[in-house]
Amino acid sequence: MVRVVDVKPREGFQIWLRFNDGTMGSVVLNDLADRGVFKIWADRRVFESVRVTDAGAVEWPGDVDLCADALYLRLTGKHPEDLFPALRTVRSDA
């Protein structure tokens, strides 16, 4: 299970992340800005108050959060099946 261990806000709607497996990099979140609960990011101070939760997720004030798994997939370009092998379909010749 991947967990975020460090997060830093960057220019625009971008965050830099470091995961417990050593993976690091920036994730662009422009597609979420100004939508639903993420409208709070219109106040730059809110976006910059990003932090890591005890569970290893990324959180902003108001209980707005993103799970580590989703961020890891965005950053690495991997597929859910890469993180969770049980999601791979089992072939059955019935």
Image: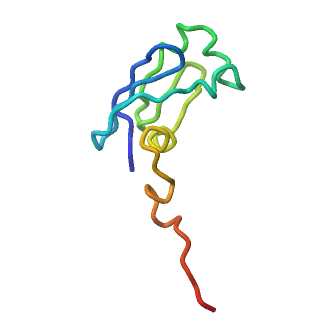
Q: Can you give x and y, in whole percent of width and height, for residue 61 in the image?
A: 56, 18
Q: Depth check: 53 or 88 in front?
A: 88
Residue drawn at 71 percent across, 24 percent down: 35
In the displayed image of the protein, which residue is found farthest to the front?
77
Residue at the image position 43 percent from the left and 23 percent from the top = 51
**Quadrant assignment, res 8:** top left
Side of 22 where 53 appears, left or right: right
The way the protein has been coloured in the rendering is: rainbow
Residue drawn at 59 percent across, 24 percent down = 30
What residue is shown at x 59% (from left), y 89% (from top)? 93
Residue farthest to the right, as pictured: 36
Residue at the outermost left position = 22
Q: Splitting the image into 4 quarters, where does residue 43 fall? A: top right
Residue 43 left/right relative to 73: right
Q: 24 and 21: which one is in front?
A: 24
Location of the C terminus (image quadrant): bottom right
**Residue 13 image offset from top left, x and y in percent:** 54, 19
* Depicted 61 relative to depicted 44: above or below: below
Looking at the image, residue 56 sits to the left or right of residue 94; the answer is left
Indicate the quadrant where residue 55 lies: top left
Relative image position of residue 88 (x, y in whole percent): 52, 68
Q: Is residue 23 above or below residue 36?
A: below
Locate residue 56, reporting x and y percent.
41, 36
